[in-house]
């Protein structure tokens, strides 16, 4: 096994499972309810503020911790950890096969998420792939200020935790165009996942777009087992 393997960073939500599973819809509803309850907002105002924070900071919780006295770990308990993932997701043998076909003597598999660690661990456990990754870089909700993609510091954190120093040794797949744009700007090899049936963005956020994770076999054939 190469001592200095490149790292393949995988986003989790709407990437390792299809967006059509609507996990994000459950999450958005719980976020809006949290805003309504803790900030005493109407449903319309809660939705607007949620979207504003998401657009400006990449995460609703970052706006909440910047401008409101909320406990981010309690927020995580009431939002991410309250999503009934066990009722929505299930083991994915095809995904497991794809990941197992990657030659981990040549590249390290690493999770890279804006979720808190508890949510990330839950998702990969339910999908039946938690044993295939060597680690996870997550958004630490206990940190102030909160750092998440697409902030440059988050990519630096991912590289440090995954043990890679050269930007050109970083490979990345994410459903967020913003995250892919920043990764490519830094020198990572970024792949934007746009689920089949969803419209492609008017401007490509990075050079490579795919409709399915299976396409990674042809995008990065050097990392897949040949036999």
Image (cartoon, helix red, strand yellow):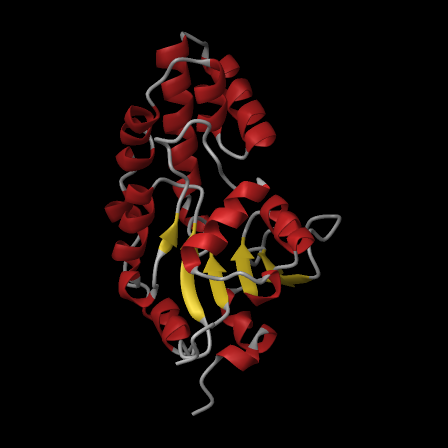
Image mark count: 0
Residue 154 visible at all? yes
Q: Nearer the viewer, residue 50 or 58?
A: 58
Q: Dividing the image into 4 quarters, which one contains the N terminus?
A: bottom left
The residue most toward the right is 203
Give the residue at x 53% y 49%: 155
Asked which quadrant contains residue 146, the reply is: top left
Q: Is residue 37 above or below residue 125?
A: above
User: In the image, 191: left or right of 100?
Assistant: right
Query: Residue 37: where, in percent of width, then height?
Result: 35, 13
Q: Is residue 100 above or below residue 84?
A: below
Q: Nearer the viewer, residue 155 or 165?
A: 165
Using the image, determine if residue 117 lies above or below residue 110.
above
**Residue placed furthest toward the top:** 40
140 relative position to 191: left or right: left
Q: Is residue 17 left or right of residue 210?
A: left
Quadrant position of the C terminus in the picture: bottom left
Residue 222 screen position, x and y as percent: 55, 81
Residue 199 visible (yes or no): no
Q: What residue lies at 28% left-to-right and 42% top-to-bottom?
A: 118
Quadrant location of residue 97? bottom left
In x, y percent, where is residue 67? 49, 15
Q: Position of residue 164 (x, y in %)?
A: 49, 62
Foreground residue, 43 or 96?
96
Q: Name the residue at 31% across, 56% down.
A: 124
């Amino acid at each position: 096994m190469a001592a200095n393997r490149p790292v393949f960073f995988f986003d989790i939500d709407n990437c390792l499972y299809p967006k059509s599973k609507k996990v994000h819809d459950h999450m958005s509803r719980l976020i809006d309810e949290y805003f309504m309850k803790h900030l005493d907002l109407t449903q319309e105002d809660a939705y607007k503020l949620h979207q504003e924070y998401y657009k400006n900071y990449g995460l609703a919780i970052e706006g909440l911790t910047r401008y409101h006295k909320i406990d981010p770990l309690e927020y995580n308990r009431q939002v991410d950890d309250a999503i009934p993932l066990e009722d929505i997701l299930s083991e994915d043998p095809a995904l497991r096969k794809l990941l197992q076909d990657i030659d981990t003597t040549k590249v390290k598999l690493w999770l890279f998420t804006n979720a808190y660690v508890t949510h990330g661990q839950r998702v990969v456990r339910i999908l039946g792939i938690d044993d295939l990754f060597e680690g996870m870089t997550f958004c630490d909700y206990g940190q102030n200020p909160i750092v998440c993609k697409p902030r440059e510091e988050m990519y630096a954190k991912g590289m440090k935790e995954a043990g890679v120093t050269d930007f050109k040794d970083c490979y990345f797949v994410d459903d967020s165009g913003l995250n892919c744009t920043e990764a490519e700007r830094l020198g990572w090899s970024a792949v934007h996942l746009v689920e089949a049936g969803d419209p492609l963005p008017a401007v490509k956020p990075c050079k490579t777009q795919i409709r399915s994770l299976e396409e990674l076999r042809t995008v990065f054939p050097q990392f897949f087992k040949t036999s």
